[in-house]
Image: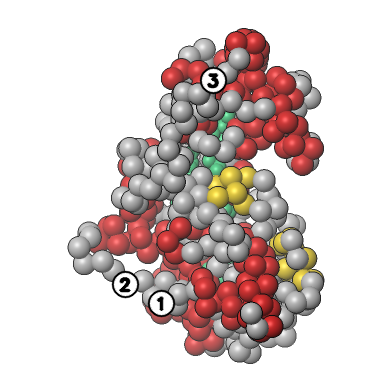
Amino acid sequence: MSIGLRIAIGAVVLVILAAIAWTLFRPGMPPQTTATATATNATTQFLNRGEYLARAGDCVACHTAPEGREFAGGRAMPTPFGNLYVPNITPDDDTGIGKWSADDFYRMMHTGISRDGSLMYPAMPFASYTKITREDSDAIYAYLMSVPPVQQKNRAHALRFPFNKRDLLLGWRALYFEEGEDVPDPKQSAQWNRGAYLVQGLGHCSMCHTAINRLGGSSESDAFEGGMIPNQNWYAPSLTSNREAGLGDWSIKDITDLLQVGISNRGTVYGPMAEVVYNSLQYVSDEDVEAMAVYLKTLPKRDSEPPPTSQARLVSPNVMETGRKVYATQCAMCHGAEGRGQPPQFPPLAGNQSITMASPVNSIRMVLNGGYPPGTRKNPRPHGMPPFAHILTDAEVAAVVTYIRVAWENNGTPVTPTQANELRTLLPE
Ligand code: HEC
Ligand code: HEC
Ligand code: HEC
């Protein structure tokens, strides 16, 4: 293998990991409306459209630091190779993108090549944004040019050699990046096509919901198949498996509720997905979120693993008894004796695919740390779940999570106290 090739492959590994390894974003204040167009109606409409699209693309989640000014950057995205610092995209001439033209902006969104010609790290989801139309890019550009400029110098990325060499991104691009605007599928309805455009493009859903292959990259053929988010210890389930987060047998109403409201009769969102709903999806219009639901329902089903055998699902009677007791005393008041919950506020655990999927990480985390669905326009005061880290031992956590994975005809597999302990030590209290 030539040295060049070896470096290129090394770079690919790193960079891709970098791309997907980000911190758990903490939601800051809700994005403020900042469009101040006073000119013609058309301009106002165009800016409003840009603001709407910027929300659908969730630019604010990465480009705003905790407690920082909107879009002024500075947020650290930790990776196994050091930190990336997200840049300032306010229209400040010296420190932001004030000098960028609409052409520069479109080229970056579409090709991942920055104004100065350098290759961008795929932590900026241009691999998804490449799908957006020129018109939508121009609207987002116009909107960003209308927000108050913030003078705040970008902090240099702190990536280790050789990952700090942008030329090495050529290797990643060759393997994983396909440039190109969305091409509507004439065999599908306009609504389906709109949903596909939003999910694959601005929504950049595949950035999390895609299996990470051995090189740390995600490839088109694995799109939406789910995976662990590195550095975050959350599992983003597969959107193409009805045993994970596949939505094939969900009603449109339950899907739109989940995405836009944050709670539904089938389940609620939490962790990184709650932040996506909080910062972005709650602002997506009823029409667009319905289009997304129509598209998501049709994603081809590709279960990567066969369902667990009855052998794999065997649980010792002791563990089952402990789990049953813990459940009855700590959980049943909200999730119901039979696991049916009190939807949509308290999610059902029986028949809930996100409880029984192969990775138990999310359920263990919920039991240890508790959580709240996001406060959204349609559900401003969500009910939460208390943390149990201080109340339950590792063995009890494992037993109760095992219990909810196998009780009520749920077809999950048992989890071990070691798995509970690993997450306990990894997670902040
Ligand atoms: C998942 C996090 C993430 C999201 C979401 C995101 N960005 Fe970025 N963005 C980044 C990172 C990281 C960089 C720096 C990449 C680099 O240095 O190669 C960046 C760079 C940029 C740049 C280049 C700025 C410069 O000075 O070079 C622009 C412009 C930009 N993003 C605009 C946007 C817009 C518009 C959106 C929403 C449609 C968006 N970003 C969404 C992470 C993100
Ligand atoms: C920042 C990473 C990230 C992004 C971006 C993201 N998701 Fe998620 N998603 C997750 C995680 C982690 C979970 C598991 C937690 C949960 O179920 O709420 C999840 C869960 C889900 C679920 C299952 C919820 C349930 O209760 O069964 C659906 C459906 C979903 N996401 C759809 C989407 C769609 C559609 C998009 C794009 C608009 C998207 N996600 C973008 C991380 C992400
Ligand atoms: C005070 C009410 C309450 C109690 C008590 C409670 N929960 Fe919850 N639980 C909730 C709420 C509300 C959510 C949704 C949280 C979110 O979306 O962030 C939830 C979510 C969950 C989830 C994630 C559901 C999904 O769709 O993946 C699991 C797993 C869970 N609870 C298990 C338990 C277990 C096990 C116990 C007992 C040890 C318990 N809960 C006790 C209210 C409660």
Residue closer to the observer: 277 or 315: 315
Q: From what the image shows, is residue 220 above or below residue 261? A: below
Q: Which mark is residue 82?
A: none
Which of the 4 image quadrants contains residue 200? Answer: bottom left
Residue at image x 77%, y 65%?
A: 82
Which residue has dot 1 on it? 180
Q: Position of residue 90 (x, y in %)?
A: 64, 75
SS label for mark 2: loop
**On the rendered image, what quadrant is the C terminus found in?**
top right
Tag nearer the camera, 3 or 2: 3
Q: Are marks 1 and 3 in contact (CB under 8 Å)?
A: no
Q: Is mark 2 within 8 Å of ligand 2?
A: no
Image side of residue 295 versus residue 116, left or right: left
**Could you give the CA–CA distance between mark 1 and mark 2, rounded to whole angstroms?**
8 Å
Q: From what the image shows, is residue 396 above or below residue 420? A: above
Sequence-wise, the earlier of marks 1 and 3 is 1
Q: Amino acid at mark 3?
A: Leu
Q: Which mark is residue 314?
A: 3
Q: Position of residue 20 (x, y in %)?
A: 62, 60
